[in-house]
């Protein structure tokens, strides 16, 4: 009997999972179906082809999809850029090419008993079928555009990052064309604007600023606004090494206050010895999957309220060239970084009146801009999702959110946990919403390990084949 595994989502996680399943299938009858909205696979929002060469935020030497071959992506990139080295920040679209090439290679080497197909569509519904005579319960996945269904013995949701949360103040701009909810789909009129507001000061804001300043003759004045006005820190050529005393120091940190103090202490010690504080951030990042579950919900909320903004700016850093570009724009007066609270957005004669209060101030200020862009980052609260698949699964009690609304609840095998608190047989999730359980689950390093663990579980093996 052929076992069919349906993967919903053809971005990094979904494509890498399909690749590993095909490489590890050996002579086992296996049918892998990859469902994705776009014709290209392995890309998602992060690695899509765009009209601007957005750069990866991590050097090429740290991005291999195969932990056993750390320079695999670098070698792939050197086929088109022979001079590239391990510390270069390369175009994101190249990484999508790399993941897609890995799937093609896996297909060529797959055993004859393995089958693979891609369905370019959106999955809109999922239901569990009654148990068969052998007691096995399978699934039926419904696709958009005609109600076609795909049967499955097991389903993996690899849905990627959700869109940003809606800005409450933006309701006043509904239907006006003055508000852009998707920072990756900027209206043409925004590129010719005189001034714009970007809500958010993270890496997405930096990418939007890069896009809008691509033509120096038509760069609008860009006002940014976030609660604290913190920008991502700069990437450097640090070498992440072992911190001998680190494990013991973090083990004693039973609260966010102590963890924060311990991390700062380690950073000072490393820098006094000639190192880089980024070594400590990397160390804590790798320890996060063990640290996060150890914290109570109250301590996690304390982290989210007081520390997350600082963690994010030190953890998710900018390539030097992007940082230099932002500095140029600020010196030229075309980029203004602001900290404060957005109070209201009001349409006014084809423009937008922005009312906001600076952080630490009492008096409200305002700008008159040509448009507003939401660059606040992904909203992981499941109840805010507008994806019909997620909405249906929630309504059916087949998935559930964690108490802090960071993502989906899963068990140690990546099976989704339903509203009744029980693991859903043969229904899995892999992707950034694993941060509910592990916190650090957004970068290639963490996600590739989760994908490999899930591939091993699905195939019932102790290892998944290397390579991407």
Image: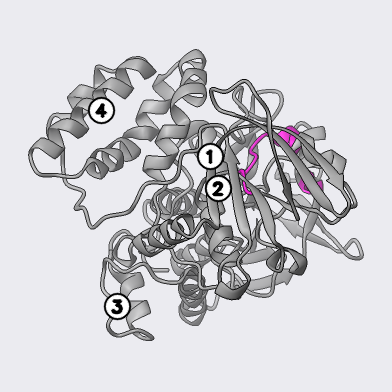
The nearer-to-camera label among 1 and 3 is: 3
Q: Is residue 386 magenta?
A: yes
The nearer-to-camera label among 4 and 2 is: 4
The reply to whether discs 2 and 1 touch (Cβ–Cβ < 8 Å) is yes
Label 4, secondary structure: give it. Answer: helix
Q: Earlier in the sequence, mark 4 or mark 3?
A: 3
Check disc 2 and report the residue beneath it: 430
In the image, residue 347 lies at what x, y percent?
A: 86, 46
In this rendering, the answer to whether 404 lies above or below 225 is above
In this rendering, the answer to whether 161 lies above or below 363 is below
Q: Earlier in the sequence, mark 4 or mark 2?
A: 4
Q: Earlier in the sequence, mark 4 or mark 1?
A: 4
> Is residue 399 left or right of 106 when viewed as pictured?
right
> Is residue 249 left or right of 331 when viewed as pictured?
left
Tell me the tag on residue 434: 1
Label 1, secondary structure: give it. Answer: helix
In the image, residue 370 lies at what x, y percent?
A: 75, 55
Which residues lie in the magenta part? 375-389
In the image, residue 317 lies at what x, y percent?
A: 39, 50
Marks 4 and 3 sit apart, C-alpha to C-alpha, by: 34 Å
């Amino acid at each position: 009997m052929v076992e069919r595994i349906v993967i919903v989502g053809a971005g990094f996680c979904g494509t890498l999972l399909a690749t590993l399943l095909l490489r590890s299938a050996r002579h086992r009858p296996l049918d892998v179906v990859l469902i994705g909205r776009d014709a290209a696979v392995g890309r998602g929002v992060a690695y899509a082809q765009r009209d601007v060469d957005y750069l990866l935020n991590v050097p090429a030497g740290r991005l291999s999809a195969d932990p056993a071959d750390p320079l695999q992506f670098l070698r792939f990139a050197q086929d088109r850029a022979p001079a590239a080295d391990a510390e270069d920040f390369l175009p994101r679209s190249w990484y999508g090419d790399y993941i897609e090439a890995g799937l093609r290679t896996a297909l060529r080497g797959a055993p004859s008993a393995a089958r693979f197909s891609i369905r370019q569509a959106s999955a809109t519904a999922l239901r569990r079928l009654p148990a068969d005579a052998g007691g096995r319960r399978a699934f039926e996945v419904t696709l958009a555009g005609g109600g076609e269904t795909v049967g499955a013995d097991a389903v993996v949701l690899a849905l990627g990052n959700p869109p940003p949360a809606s800005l409450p103040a933006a309701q006043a701009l509904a239907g006006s064309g003055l508000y852009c909810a998707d920072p990756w789909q900027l209206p043409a009129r925004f590129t010719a604007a005189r001034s714009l507001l970007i809500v958010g000061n993270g890496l997405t804001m930096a990418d939007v600023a890069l896009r809008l300043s691509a033509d120096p003759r038509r760069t609008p004045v860009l006002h940014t606004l976030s609660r604290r006005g913190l920008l991502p820190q700069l990437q450097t050529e640090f070498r992440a090494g072992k911190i001998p005393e680190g494990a013991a120091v973090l083990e004693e940190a039973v609260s966010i206050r102590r963890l924060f103090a311990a991390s700062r202490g380690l950073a000072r010690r490393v820098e006094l010895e000639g190192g880089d504080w980024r070594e400590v951030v990397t160390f804590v990042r790798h320890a996060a999957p063990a640290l996060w579950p150890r914290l109570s919900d109250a301590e996690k909320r304390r982290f989210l309220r007081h520390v997350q903004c600082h963690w994010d700016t030190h953890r998710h850093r900018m390539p030097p060239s992007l940082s230099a570009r932002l500095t140029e724009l600020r010196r030229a007066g075309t980029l203004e970084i602001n900290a404060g609270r957005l109070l209201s957005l009001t349409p006014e004669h084809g423009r937008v009146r922005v009312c906001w209060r600076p952080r630490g101030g009492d008096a409200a200020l305002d700008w008159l801009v040509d448009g507003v862009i939401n660059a606040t980052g992904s909203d992981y609260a499941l109840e805010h999702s507008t994806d019909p698949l997620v909405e249906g699964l929630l309504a059916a009690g087949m998935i559930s959110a964690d108490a802090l609304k960071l993502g989906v609840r899963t068990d140690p095998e990546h099976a989704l946990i339903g509203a009744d608190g029980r693991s859903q047989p043969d229904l899995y999730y892999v992707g950034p919403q694993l941060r509910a359980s592990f916190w650090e689950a957004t970068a290639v390093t963490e996600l590739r390990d989760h994908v490999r663990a899930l591939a091993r579980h699905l195939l019932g093996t102790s290892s998944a084949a290397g390579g991407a």
